[in-house]
Amino acid sequence: MKYTPRLPVSEVNVTPRSALKEFVLLAGALTGIVVGGYLVLGLAVDLIVPRLSVDFEKKLAGAFFSALESKPGRTEHERWVQTLTDRLQARCAGLPYRLKIRVQESPAVNALALPGGHVVVFSGLLNTVASENELAFILAHEMGHFNHRDHLRGAGRALVLMTISAALFGPDSDISAALGHVLNITELSFSRGQETAADEFGLDVLQCAYGHAAGATDFFRKIPASQDPGVFGHYFSSHPENQRRISHLDALIGQKGYETGGENTRG
Amino acid sequence: METLLIFFVLMGVGYAAGTFAEKRHYRSIHTREQALLRLPAVTTRTSHYADTQIESADLVLGSAVISVDYFKQFVAMLRKIFGGTVRSYETLLDRARREAVLRMKEVAGDAVVIVNVRIEAAPIGKKSRKGNVSCVEAVAYGTALWLRPS
């Protein structure tokens, strides 16, 4: 047996293909799937939300907001806002929620509607409002969000995306955090149409509670155009279109024949 | 956001440095394979030399550890989602095996043949949840035969 040494004629063990091309292909496919999944599941959220019972929502929210539930020692401010909310709720709004007010010490001029009937009011907002009517309109606006279940839509979409990201990259990954930033922007633009609907609901509640609609637009007139957006997504000051909302409310007041000459109740 | 920047920098560095090192390594492999062509390394247990011709037989062993770069690992991670041939690891193992064989031949020196050659590979570096960069080791070993001076 004669052995003839020779070099391998071809590199069969190495596929002659650019790794960069493979990376672009795979990363592109993955991005497509994530985006597609987000759109589909986001759509699913919009279908599911109107069918979710309030009881079930409370159960879901319990897991996320148990810290808010168990907070002891309510402040005087908190009790006062709670009383005002309960009165609006009992007489005019009639939502299937037991709304729980939480006043958060923060310079942010904002209020948030969270799943489970939680309303977070920042102390910066309480310092800004001058009359009870003004605050009542803001609370009624938040009730409008509950009525249309916008708070679930927002949380649902956020939940869907974060779930995908956490499943693929891990819950603590930088990619998840980066997606969280992107998410805020889209959810804000997403909710703009809902703000108008909430304004309309708020206006009706205000008229019902006080017999006039004075104070409905006071708050928007106070927000300077260059309001610094705080830590949370601002419901009010994130909207550069305050003027548009004022005009819309004014038009609606005229259309429905609501009075605005009524006396503002001092807060 | 800056963590995302770090990710892209690592990807870039991994791709550039990894490609550079790989090209250089293959150049070296090709030259040395040519130079060591005179020494056959075969998997048979015997050679065509008669027992009387053989002066000595000894174990020769070569091993090489090649590390994966960040870019290759990320592509492989993507590949794990979709399945299929993990091409980005192919050069890694190929280089490790060929380098190990070359080193084994270099150890054998002026032997006439290496018989019963075996090649094995093993991963090195614990794979953790964080997915830190790991390496592969290839070991090539066989029995080198030296002839009596005739």
Image (tube, grey):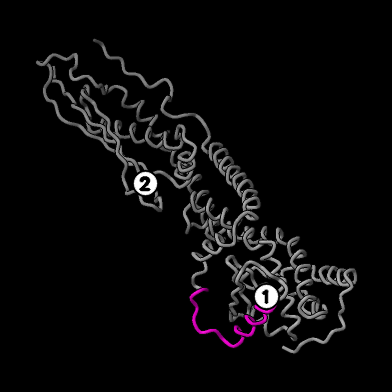
**Overall secondary structure of the magenta section:** helix
Residue A237 in sight from this viewpoint? no
The quarter of the rendered structure image containing the N terminus of chain A is top left
Please tell me if label 1 and label 2 are on a single chain: no
Q: Where in the figure is residue B8, as x and y percent of width and height?
A: 54, 52
Residue at the image position 76 percent from the left and 82 percent from the top: A133
Q: Where in the figure is residue B42, as x and y percent of width and height?
A: 25, 21
To which chain does the residue with label 1 belong?
A: A
The quarter of the rendered structure image containing the C terminus of chain A is bottom right
The residue indicated by pointer 1 is A90
Q: Cβ–Cβ below 8 Å for labels 1 and 2?
A: no
Highlighted magenta segment, given as a residue range? A68-90
Q: Amino acid at mark 1?
A: Ala
- Say which quarter of the image contains residue B99: top left
- Magenta stretch containing residue A69, yes or no? yes
Q: In this orientation, which residue lies closer to the viewer: A15 or A185?
A: A185
Against A229, residue B35 (above or below) is above
Q: In this orientation, which residue lies closer to the viewer: B59 or A143?
A: A143
Q: Which mark is residue B134?
A: 2
Query: Viewed as shown, does residue B67 lie left or right of A126?
Result: left
- Magenta stretch containing residue B111, yes or no? no
Against A175, residue B21 (above or below) is above
Query: Viewed as shown, does residue A239 lie left or right of B104?
Result: right
Residue at the image position 77 percent from the left and 65 percent from the top: A196
To which chain does the residue with label 2 belong?
A: B
Q: In this orientation, which residue lies closer to the viewer: B142 or B11?
A: B11
